[in-house]
Image: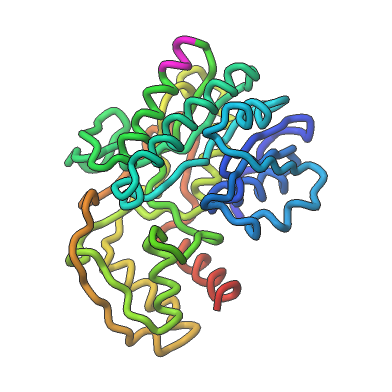
Amino acid sequence: MNTPTVNLSSEHHILVTGGAGFIGSNLCEFLLGNGNQVTCLDNFATGKRENIAPLLSNKRFTLIEGDIRNLDDCMKSCEGVDYVLHQAALGSVPRSINDPITSNAVNVSGFLNMLTAARDARVKRFIYAASSSTYGDSESMPKVEDVIGKPLSPYAITKYVNELYADVFSKTYGIETIGLRYFNVFGRKQDPKGAYAAVIPKFVMQLMNHESPTINGDGTYSRDFTYIDNVIQMNVRAILANTQEAVNTVYNTACGNRTSLNELVSYLKEFLGDFDSEIKNIEVVHGEKRLGDVPHSLASIEKAKKLLDYEPRFDIKDGLRHCIAWYWENLK
């Protein structure tokens, strides 16, 4: 892993909310591996116990089973914490369309609870998972942090409200905040199952089972797919940021390149074909466009490069090769 080391001694304490989830568990594993004390807060609604099972025996790791919708759980998890990496959320645009009330309760009320708890515990910095969905119907390309459109889903609204609350808390209470607008993150430990599975693990699992993946639309929609280790690096850079200009703002967290869904499936078939040659011949099915989907997404990462010294180490092909090798070893 080429992610930079966090220069924090074991006396420093980092809370990862949603720490049993895909991104959260990878963050917990990395931070522990670099000598930090880590607390994980998770209610296991979407997180998985197996993601953190190898960490439970580490004396520097603490699991708090709780819910960010419960302020007391948030207050307890922030005790003695230096930095918060807030990953807990209900993701998925379709999920939010089907159940906007629960998405709002978790992503807005839960976020406000965590901000309040972090403020009261006087944490040094609150770093949170924002979302590229905030760009909404903006047609500008690439996406630049200060140019957004109107949200296209309840989920997008909740993530934009997070940014508004963080901005108000930094100005009103003096707590340092950094929002990381994640662009289609993928990698090891991402769940391929369930109604709201992300496209890459879902397609990988289908192809490994010799099933035809279904692309929503004609496959020309494109995304800035971002490998998990690039995301870990951005969280680390956000912890280490040491200038006033670099905090109390938001950053695109991406690779800076876009890939169409048709291209994505082509890569998946090619790389999976190295393990099973029959996969290269599997046909793709095209379905209806998905409600609330943004047609194209491409991030400018110039701000992160300039203020956080961020440099993505993995492009889409590198990330997919690592990701597919992990899925083949763990799920085949």
Outermost residue on the bottom side: it is: 278
Instruction: Answer above or below: position of 143 versus 178.
Output: below
- In the shown orientation, is residue 13 left or right of residue 317? right
* 104 relative to 80 in the view: left or right: left
Q: Position of residue 220 (x, y in %)?
A: 20, 62
**Quadrant of the rendered image containing residue 266:** bottom left
In which quadrant is the C terminus drawn?
A: bottom right
Closer-to-camera residue (174/162): 162
Q: In which quarter of the image is residue 250?
A: top left
- Residue 318 can be seen, yes or no: no
Predominant secondary structure, magenta span = helix
Foreground of the two, 31 or 94: 94
Q: Quadrant of residue 326?
A: bottom right
Q: Residue drawn 41% across and 20% down?
A: 167
Work out whether residue 326 can be spotted.
yes
Residue 324: in magenta span? no
The image shows residue 234, relative to residue 11, as above or below, that is: below
User: What is the span of residues highlighted in magenta in the rendered image?
Assistant: 168-172
Percent coordinates x, y for residue 126 in the rendering: 55, 27
Depicted 282 relative to depicted 174: above or below: below
Left or right: residue 273 versus residue 134 is right
